[in-house]
Amino acid sequence: MIEIKNIQKTFGDRTVLAGVSGTFKPGDTSLIIGGSGTGKSVLLKCMIGLVKPEVGQVLYSGRDFLTGDQDTQKAIRREMGVLFQGGALFDSKTVLENVRFPLDMLTQMSAAEKRERARFCLQRVGLDAAADRMPSEISGGMKKRVGIARAIVMNPKYLFCDEPNSGLDPLTSIKIDELIREITDEFKITTVVITHDMNSMMEIGEKIMFLYKGKKLWEGNSATITHSNVPELNEFIYANKLLRDSDSHQ
Amino acid sequence: MHYLGRYFIFLGSLFRNREKFGVYTKLVLDECIQIGINSVFIVSIVSTFIGAVTCVQTAYNMVSPFVPTYIISLIVRDMTVLELAPTITCVVLSGKVGSNIASGLGTMRITEQIDALEVMGINSSSYLILPKVLASMITFPMLVILSGFLSIYGGYIAGTLAKLITSEEYIYGLRSDFNPFNITFALIKSIVFAFLISTISSFKGYYTSGGALEVGQASTAAVTNSCIAVLAADFLLAQLLL
């Protein structure tokens, strides 16, 4: 389980996160939603240790990630998998080498075991055939799937996805969402997804946190999101014409 | 001062929380190919022509009949070993290698590849930059030796083909009043320049933020700052060691 407590972050005189708290449970796909510039990505970066908040705690199964010693931080990092917005695949390595990279760096497995594990993860995301291709030779959706394969190769307890659907067509987006949900269920991972994709919210939002101007304004799930009485959230949701129209028909 | 402080903190981060020694072996070899072998062509071309031009221009300036002709090759040798081979080669390399390092790291930064390493618990600066620094410090002296040889050989070809000096005179001049410390001095300079170019370029690339425009700016800044650092270090080393 991940707990965040009173996370505050400022850049210069601009407050990006003004005391955000929340809990993310194992086996749940939790979504953090909000418009651009509301602090979603900064919150994610605070959670994975890329940005240090001025105030607050990030607890992984009770272990404090931000103030823990180097060994604790290293141990927590090894339990994390992160899917970055653009995939963040290493340009100089093939797809298989990208997926195998965490195993090469962080485990004592034999070469055969590493290859087998990397192949398994690639099969899991349906990309076994692309193992020997370079990242520049595959599509955006494939890059995301390779990113997911790399994120799960170490059997993580915690999976973070930063806008997994950005830049993808609706069909590929649905496939990526389904893949994230399946992996979360299958391996009982605590998954946190940053998104502003309405389809993702409705499809995989077992728990949804809405951020607005650095504050958590609402928390719920896909069943309750359309019935909230938070004007900022309603404005965000119904910015989509299709949803607005379908809701007015109902 | 702010940047200088950040630069020294950055240098410290290369050696803290390093990966196991074995991890670096293959990386250093790969970087030696990227930085060293891939620079052989440009270094060869530049050095040969610099030697040829030095020979022709020295001969052009020798107007007194009391100065023996073999002095031409003596001047070519000393200019090459003391200055042209180490400094000009490293200025050329600061353009080729420096921009390559800065743009490569800058692109990795803006495409979140460096963040990906960090979240895995890998010291990204040590993993990415230390091999580049070590490879530069291994290959630059080799390139300088190659440059020195080709520059002197370029002078020989130009001098004999243009009938400015005979082959025997050229070789006699090369052997006259030879001070072996000059070679040591050239190699010391090449190692110092390698360190400066690789670390300054890495520093510029590693801390790139923004997009493609900033990567280009980081690359330009890397080359400019490396050149200035090389020339300043050149003067300091000459004052200290000669």
Image (spheres, rainbow, N blue to C red):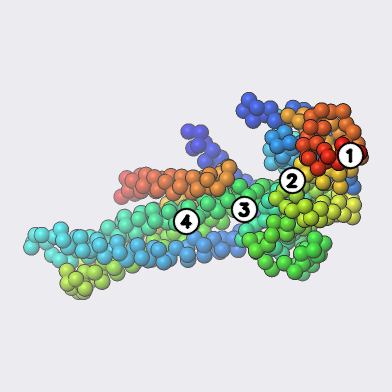
Residues tagged 2 and 3 counted as in contact (Cβ below 8 A):
no
The residue where tag 4 is placed is B97
Q: Nearer the viewer, residue B189 or B206?
A: B206
Q: Element under label 3?
A: helix
Q: Picture coordinates of residue B223 (x, y %)?
A: 44, 49
Q: Amino acid at mark 4?
A: Val
Q: Element under label 1?
A: helix
Q: Which mark is residue A74?
A: none
From mark 1 to mark 3, how far is it between C-alphas?
A: 57 Å
Direction top: furthest residue: A13
The residue where tag 1 is placed is A249
Q: Nearer the viewer, residue A136 or B171?
A: A136
Dots 1 and 2 on the same chain: yes
Q: Nearer the viewer, residue A218 or B104?
A: A218
Q: Amino acid at mark 3?
A: Tyr
Looking at marks 3 and 4 on the same chain, the residue that comes earlier in the sequence is marked by 4
From mark 3 to mark 4, how far is it between C-alphas?
A: 18 Å
**Which mark's residue is nearer the viewer, 3 or 4?**
4
Q: Element under label 4?
A: helix
**Which mark's residue is nearer the viewer, 1 or 3?**
1
**Which mark's residue is nearer the viewer, 4 or 1?**
1
